[in-house]
Image (tube, grey):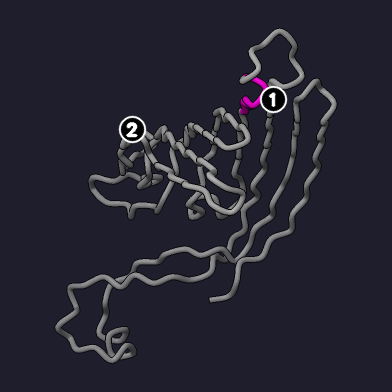
């Protein structure tokens, strides 16, 4: 296998002067070639001989990984907003340690190799909040991850062209807490997927 190759173009805007807020917007394009794809072929006698296997495997399929001969273009938009409550007057003293945030990533794929390009989600949204004091830190984050396409399914009597396996849309909540006893000693705990959200695997087709 050869490594992936990509030409990347990025344009970003950021500002830190919006009354405790940090706002950023980024546009990017990635022209990707030689990405990895899986190929499936019949285990012919010639192929088995080349692999040093006997004819006992003639009814099997051979799945291998290779580089794609076609390229894809990935256009994306990323945006984020992080707000500290510290600059706002009239709030309780403890609220000065609170921050809230939201960010998103939106992708669009095109090109001759788009049917074989997998492992990405066209839309991801994250939001959450944190609280920090001299000894205590608490964080909570939610991620909504759009349908993530996996592999292309071979055409058959039950699978029309353009059928894919995928990990369906899911929402995952994470949390962490830290208590600092001393400047060198702290107790820390974190939990991934607080609600035990499943990771549903599906097969979908154009119709």
Q: Is residue 98 magenta-colored?
A: yes
Whether 109 is drawn above or below 85: the answer is: below
Residue depicted at 56% across the width and 63% down the height: 35
* Residue 46 percent location from the top left of the image: 30, 86
| Mark 2: secondary structure | loop
Q: Which mark is residue 195?
A: 2
* Residue 74 percent location from the top left of the image: 64, 47
Residue at mark 1? 83
Q: What stretch is highlighted in magenta?
A: 95-101
Counting residues from the start of the chain, the first of labels 2 and 1 encountered is 1
Residue depicted at 34% across the width and 52% down the height: 153
How many labels were placed on the picture? 2
* Residue 55 percent location from the top left of the image: 17, 86
Quadrant of the frame with the C terminus: top left
Q: Say which quarter of the image contains residue 148.
A: top left
Q: Is residue 109 magenta-colored?
A: no
Residue depicted at 59% across the width and 44% down the height: 109
Instruction: Compare residues 124 and 110 and report the one nearer the observer.
Output: 124
Whether 56 is drawn above or below 81: the answer is: below
Mark 2 vs 1: CB contact within 8 A:
no
């Amino acid at each position: 296998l050869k490594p992936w190759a990509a030409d990347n173009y990025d344009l970003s805007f950021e500002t830190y002067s919006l009354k405790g807020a940090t706002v950023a917007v980024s546009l990017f394009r990635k022209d990707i070639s030689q990405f990895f794809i899986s190929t499936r072929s019949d285990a012919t006698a010639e192929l088995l001989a080349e692999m040093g296997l006997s004819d006992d495997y003639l009814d099997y399929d051979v799945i291998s990984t290779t580089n794609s001969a076609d390229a894809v273009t990935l256009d994306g938009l990323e945006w984020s907003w992080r707000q500290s409550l510290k600059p706002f007057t009239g709030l309780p003293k403890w609220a000065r340690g609170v921050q809230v945030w939201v960010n998103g990533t939106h992708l669009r794929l095109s090109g001759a190799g788009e049917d074989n390009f997998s492992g990405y989600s066209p839309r991801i949204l994250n939001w959450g909040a944190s609280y920090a004091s001299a000894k205590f830190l608490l964080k909570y984050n939610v991620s909504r991850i759009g349908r993530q396409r996996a592999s292309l399914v071979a055409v058959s009597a039950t699978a029309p062209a353009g059928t894919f396996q995928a990990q369906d849309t899911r929402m995952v909540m994470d949390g962490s807490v830290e208590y600092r006893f001393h400047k060198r000693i702290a107790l820390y705990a974190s939990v991934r997927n607080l609600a035990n959200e499943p990771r549903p695997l599906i097969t979908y087709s154009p119709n």
